[in-house]
Amino acid sequence: MNEVNKLLWAPALLVGLALATCKPAAPADAPTTEAPAPVEPAPVDPIAAAPQEPSEQAPSDAATAEPESGEPVAQVDPQPEGEGAPEAAETPAAKAKAEPEPLPPPLFKDVKGACGGDPGVGTSAKPFALKSPSGGEIKLASYRGRVVLLNFWGTWCKPCLKELPEFDRLYRRYRKHGLTLIAVATDEDADAVAAFVKQRKLAAKVAIGGQALADAYGSPQFPFSFVIDKG
């Protein structure tokens, strides 16, 4: 080869090498992503898909456990509660408990003991003859055959002034049935007794100067009264 051809061939070779070097490499095959195949639904079992009824649970050991003595620790009531629950049979013990207890029998006491056993009951009345405020005479013997309410009082005694009008009202009601009220005042002043009798319009038989007679009965209370029978 002559010099001219060598000079022409060398540049061509360099250009070819440069082109070969600068040529981009062919892209590598990219991995392809395949779409997943559709999954067919599994067949449904009609028996397994049906709703299951809750199974009865066995009672726990605490409900049925028994101690060594043989007595149950707890008792489970099998009867349902609430509306519609059957009523339990009424036992004789429950029926007896629901019925009210009978009242205790009444207690009776001796009338004499309840009244305190007044020692004057059954004794004879003391006879007397006293003056009335108007100057007349009042004798117990004049009223034999009648029931006599003998009341001792005084114008100085405030409880007496409240009690005597009530006795007089009782006398007015029962005098037609044989009752007589004799009001013995311990006062000696006839005018004071007469003024009270007139003011209260008493219908009773009123006597004055009865302090000695009141002392003879020896009552610790004042005013005090006695009921004298017809004998």
Image (tube, grey):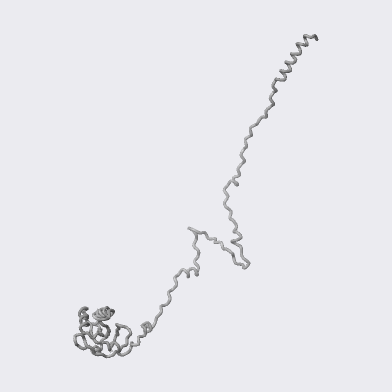
| Residue 108 drawn at (x, y percent) | 40, 80
* Quadrant where the C terminus is found in the figure: bottom left
| Residue appearing at x 42%, y 77% in the figure | 105
Q: Nearer the viewer, residue 111 or 2?
A: 2
| Residue 138 drawn at (x, y percent) | 22, 88
Tell me if I can see residue 178 in this picture: no
| Residue 202 drawn at (x, y percent) | 22, 80
Q: Nearer the viewer, residue 200 or 70?
A: 200
In the displayed structure, would residue 118 be above or below residue 24? below
* Quadrant where the N terminus is found in the figure: top right
In the displayed structure, would residue 103 be above or below residue 119? above
Q: How many marks?
A: 0
The answer to whether residue 159 is left or right of residue 83 is left
The answer to whether residue 32 is left or right of residue 78 is right
Q: Nearer the viewer, residue 101 or 118?
A: 118
Tell me if I can see residue 48 in this picture: yes
Q: Residue furthest right?
A: 1
Query: In the rendered image, which quarter is residue 111 located in?
Result: bottom left
| Residue 216 drawn at (x, y percent) | 30, 89
Query: In the rendered image, which quarter is residue 157 located in?
Result: bottom left
| Residue appearing at x 43%, y 76% in the figure | 104
| Residue appearing at x 79%, y 9% in the figure | 3
